[in-house]
Image (tube, grey):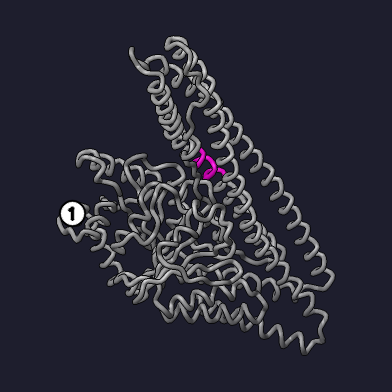
Amino acid sequence: MDRVTALLHTIAGIAGNIQNEQIKRIALSNIDKLSKQHLNLVVLGQFKRGKTTVINAMLGENVLPSAVVPLTSIITRLTYNENKTAQVRFYNERKKDIPFPEIGDYVTEKGNPDNTKGVDHVEIGYPSEYLRQGIVLVDTPGIGSTFAHNTAVAYNYLPSMDAGIFVVSGDPPLSEAEYTYLDSIKDYVAKIFFLFNKIDTMSEQEYTESLDFTRDLLRKKLGIGDIRILPVSARQALQARLEHNDGLFRKSNFWQFEESLEHFIQKDKSNVLAASTMNRAANLAKDLTLHLELTIRAVNSPIDELKKKIGLLRGEIGTIEKKHRDMELLLEGEVKSLKAGIENGIEQFKSQASVRLKAGLSGLFSAGRQKQDMVHILTEYLKSGIEREFSPWFESEEKRVSREISRILMDYARAVDEEINKVKQIAADLFHLHAERTEDITSMDPYSRLWYKVDDIIAWGIDNIPLILPKFFFRNYLLKQSENRINEEIDRNAGRARYDLFRRIDSTKDKFIDELENRKGAVTGGILSAVTRAEQLKTMNEPEAQGKMKTLEGYLGQLRTMGS
């Protein structure tokens, strides 16, 4: 631990002296975390896997909202406090203390749509034994969705993750989005707990078979040999805690997970924290070393040669920038294609739903029904029918679009990551240096959540029915008007679904591109700063330049000594 802290202090000091504020800030934040022995335990899971219920079960109280309405991309951090506290932190650095019942007003899509309130994150203090032992529980957006986290630039937590709790379940099986996500983080964290949730919704044979199936898939997809997946019911565990029901808690099997977590805290926490922080420190040291080596090597180049190389480097960065713009166009094309597929799917669904709803009209009325009864029966049929048609369709479409947008964004992130490493390699080649790869960008979470809610859109009745018509004609008139109304309602609801999906796709794409653009700019800017610093040194008088060079060489020696 002392070695990691010392390395981070060295990195922060050197970065500050050469005006690399980004590296300095990251190093200092990791020093602070190590000193407090705070381990970020990030709870991960696809929407509807029950990850928020897992957190609430650990705390023994419904602290975080876990209704049908999903959380937004607002990050929620839970740390130890003797009293229950909740504080909203805004982008403008304003802070607001709120009571627990108001948490949902800031972290849910219903309470804070599209983060219109400008929330950076929410800090919750809670008297939990886990938190008292230095665990920081971090609730992140659901994996495999399309509502990207609104705080990606300032508060991207995945690169800061020390350990994770990955929540899966048997229905539906693991998605490609989850595989992709796990594959991107498995090399960055030292510990992941796998929970197979919702066993209370399956028979023992069903969940055993599903658990074995999930374990085999993870082994094949991720190439991990020994995977321990704990079957639990977070819902039963939370209920048991609330009702003080020991028998139900045993039945939930949550105690096995808690035993594993407690063993981890007592035996492995410090080592995992040191290992994960060391990994981040090593990446910082690599970038800082390259910047120093570039300056030192560049200073030793003749001024004309140096200017030529700086020009070449700017040209190469410009070429990569153009390629990056081309990549953005390809990304836009894939998103456009995804939207076209959604449009086609919506039209097909509308046609099929209309046929099914109209087919059920004729058998609604039995002989002897009064006219007012017919109106009531038909109104209820249409209300329930619209919801019955839209709910399963949208849930299925949500999952499909989630998988596709996750795949598209991860492919784009990997391509940008490759270009960033290419910039480093080009700079290193120009000055005959070795550049080590770093892969911070693909550890981002591109996932977020699609959300659709059927509420008032089905709450309509049938007005202005001419009750003076004879019953036979009244019935036929009612059915004819209902067929027209079915088409209108299906079209209206489909339009709302289309708008919801498209808006979230665009929001995710734009924010994700901005975050990657900032990361890329930081790397290219740091490299150009390193070589232009050398150009400035060559304009100084010789004693002054030699003194600064000696200082830079001393920094480089420190980093090499610390890293060996």
Q: Is residue 404 magenta?
A: yes
Seen at 49% across and 32% down, the residue is 460
Give the left or right position of residue 508, taking residue 525 as reference: left
**Residue 181 vs residue 108, the one in the foreground:** 108
As helix, strand or loop, the secondary structure at mark 1 comes to helix
Residue where numbered disc 1 is placed: 248
Residue 426 appears in the picture as rendered: yes
Q: Which residues are magenta?
A: 401-408
In the picture as drawn, the residue positioned furthest to the right comes out as 304
Residue at the farthest left position: 247
**Above or below, comparing residue 32 to residue 181 in the picture:** below
Q: Is residue 289 in view from this perspective?
A: no
Q: Quadrant of the N terminus?
A: bottom left
Residue at screen point 20% across, 56% down? 249
Q: Is residue 15 above or below residue 192?
A: below
In x, y percent, where is residue 555?
61, 81
| Number of residues whose C-alpha sits closer than 10 Å to that of mark 1, classed few (under 14), some (14–19) or many (20 or more) | some
Q: Main secondary structure of the magenta part?
A: helix
Q: Is residue 124 on the magenta stretch? A: no
Residue 137, image x and y in percent?
39, 65
17 horizontally vs 464: left or right = right
Badge count: 1
